[in-house]
Amino acid sequence: MKPAEAYILKQKEPYRSIMMHLQAVIEHSLSDAELKYKWRLPCFYIGKKPICYINQSKDYVDVGFWHSAHFAKKFDSYLVSENRKIVKSLRYRTLEEVADDVLIAILKEVELHKEKSFWK
């Protein structure tokens, strides 16, 4: 078993189910995405470029995106930055909170900007 998968499976519920669902949506939406274990987190890469990570933190699962500086403004209401300079993320406390359509739209936006720098 890959370290990233082990990280996901060792999480307590409901976080494990949320992370497994997110993994499935990401892998289905971005067929070139590869799950790796970097910075002690499950991270998705396309080629050598990091796309996003998933992490259980406090009482939520965080899906962080490095390319958020390039996202359309329509996603601003969904993303949290919390004083981070580059990364913005989606946060989920329950599986029911996961809006697949929003996540997929953001993943498609990431795919459009994957060759760009994290900075705008």
Image (spheres, helix red, strand yellow):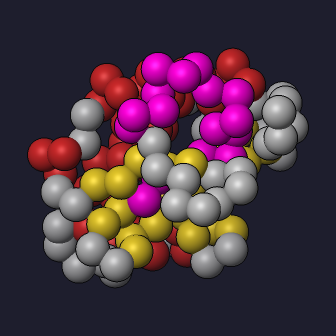
Residue 5 against residue 32 in the figure, above or below: below
Question: In the shown orientation, is residue 91 left or right of residue 50?
Answer: left
User: Can residue 15 be seen in this snapshot?
Assistant: yes
Q: Nearer the viewer, residue 15 or 66?
A: 66
Question: In the shown orientation, is residue 60 left or right of residue 5?
Answer: left
Residue 80 against residue 107 in the figure, above or below: below
Percent position of residue 21, x then y: 29, 48
Q: Nearer the viewer, residue 31 or 15?
A: 15
Percent position of residue 88, x then y: 56, 49
The mark tally for this picture is 0
Q: Nearer the viewer, residue 81 or 92?
A: 81
Determine which quarter of the picture holds residue 105.
top left
Question: In the shown orientation, is residue 31 left or right of residue 27?
Answer: right
Residue 90 covered by magenta stretch: no
User: Can residue 20 be seen in this snapshot?
Assistant: no
Tell me the residue at 41%/47% (across/down): 90
Question: In the shown orientation, is residue 80 left or right of residue 20?
Answer: right
Residue 72 against residue 76 in the figure, above or below: above
Percent position of residue 23, x then y: 41, 48
The single residue placed furthest to the left in the displayed view is 96
Tell me the residue at 64%/52% (across/down): 87
Percent position of residue 30, x then y: 55, 29
Tell me the residue at 63%/68% (across/down): 37
Residue 72 covered by magenta stretch: yes
Tell me the residue at 23%/79% (across/down): 12
Determine which quarter of the picture holds residue 51.
top right
Determine which quarter of the picture holds residue 79.
top left
Magenta stretch in the rendered image: 62-78
The C terminus is located in which quarter? top right
